[in-house]
Image (tube, rainbow, N blue to C red):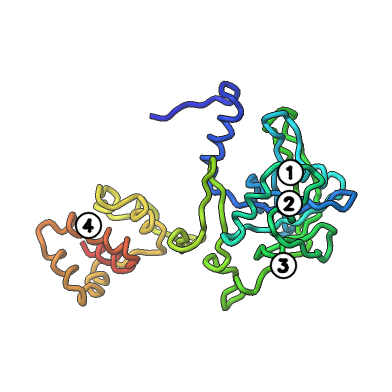
Amino acid sequence: MKRKIIPGTIPTADLHQYLLGSVAPRPIAFVSTMDAQGRTNLAPYSFFNAFSSNPPILVFSSNRRVEGNTTKDTLHNIMESKECVVNVVNYEIVRQMMICSVDFPTEISEFEQSGLTPVPAELVKCPLVKESPVNMECVVQEIIPLGDQGGAGHLIICKVVCMHVSESILDENSRIDPQKIDLMGRMGRAFYVRASGKSVLAMPQSQHLPIVGYPNLPEHIRMSNILSANHIAYMSGLKALPNQLTALEVLKDFPDCQNIIKSIDKINSGHHLAVKLFEEGNMDLAVNLLCAL
């Protein structure tokens, strides 16, 4: 059974939490801005993502406060300057980032309160966060109000004009290593997720045809109540499946598999062993076992 929720029939604060708990984890834009008097502001926003690579576009939303229907310093500063820096949040600075979510008066610097270090940017006036592993200098192309009531967002469309990427988070191919960057993501309420360690999964999938496809799987795989939907979908997404003779040849050096193939209950036993192999990361052997049954 699922609970039905119609926006407008429950308090905005409650709907907000249903949305945030469902659309998660969300990346965090740690946005630094500067007002006309040169005062800096630093605040986190998790209504945020990258929307284009060419041109390089980031979008985040600065929402009206539900209580009081007021707007935030980030929005005021961006409306004046039309620029900002989006800094990413890794595990090392997550607690300092949380301090910056406190509603300080305009004249109080979140950099000072959090102990984070402002560093001059190259192309915009507002500072970078030195401790962040990636900083993206942006010019703001458009601000789109989404409403005038508490909880309404302002979509802030930012074009990246300069990126600063720490060498320490790059792998041997100059790509960002998810384990090294150690990013944090926002969930609902007071929950966060750390995107490193066992939480990071390598799941390659070809984007080009041909693939096997679910209808072309052997029936005992499609109808299995032992294999999970993920196991079955993994096989559906392969370029091709080995034929039975090829699979049997691969299994010659694996006595456990050989014994199952010769058993009376080979389908159920084979599926249970395949699950174990999948969970151990031995994907090829699991596929060959299932195709040999």
Judging by the rendered image, the residue that carries numbered circle 4 is: 272
Q: How far separated are the C-alphas under marks 2 and 3?
A: 21 Å
In the displayed structure, 4 sits above or below 41; it is above
What amino acid is at disc 4?
Answer: His
Q: Count neighbours of disc 3 (C-alpha within 10 A) and say few if under 14, some if 14 to 19, many if 20 or more.
A: some
What amino acid is at disc 1?
Answer: Phe
Q: How far separated are the C-alphas under marks 1 and 2?
A: 8 Å
Mark 4–mark 2 CB contact (< 8 Å): no
Look at the numbered disc 1 and give the secondary structure of its residue.
loop
Q: How far separated are the C-alphas under marks 1 and 3?
A: 28 Å
Give the farthest residue toward the right: 37
Q: Residue 265: x percent and y percent?
A: 12, 56
Which residue appears at 34% of the width and 54% of the height?
232
State which mark lies toward you, 4 or 3: 3
- Which corner quadrant holds the N terminus? top left
Instruction: Say the numbered circle drawn on residue 164.
Output: 3
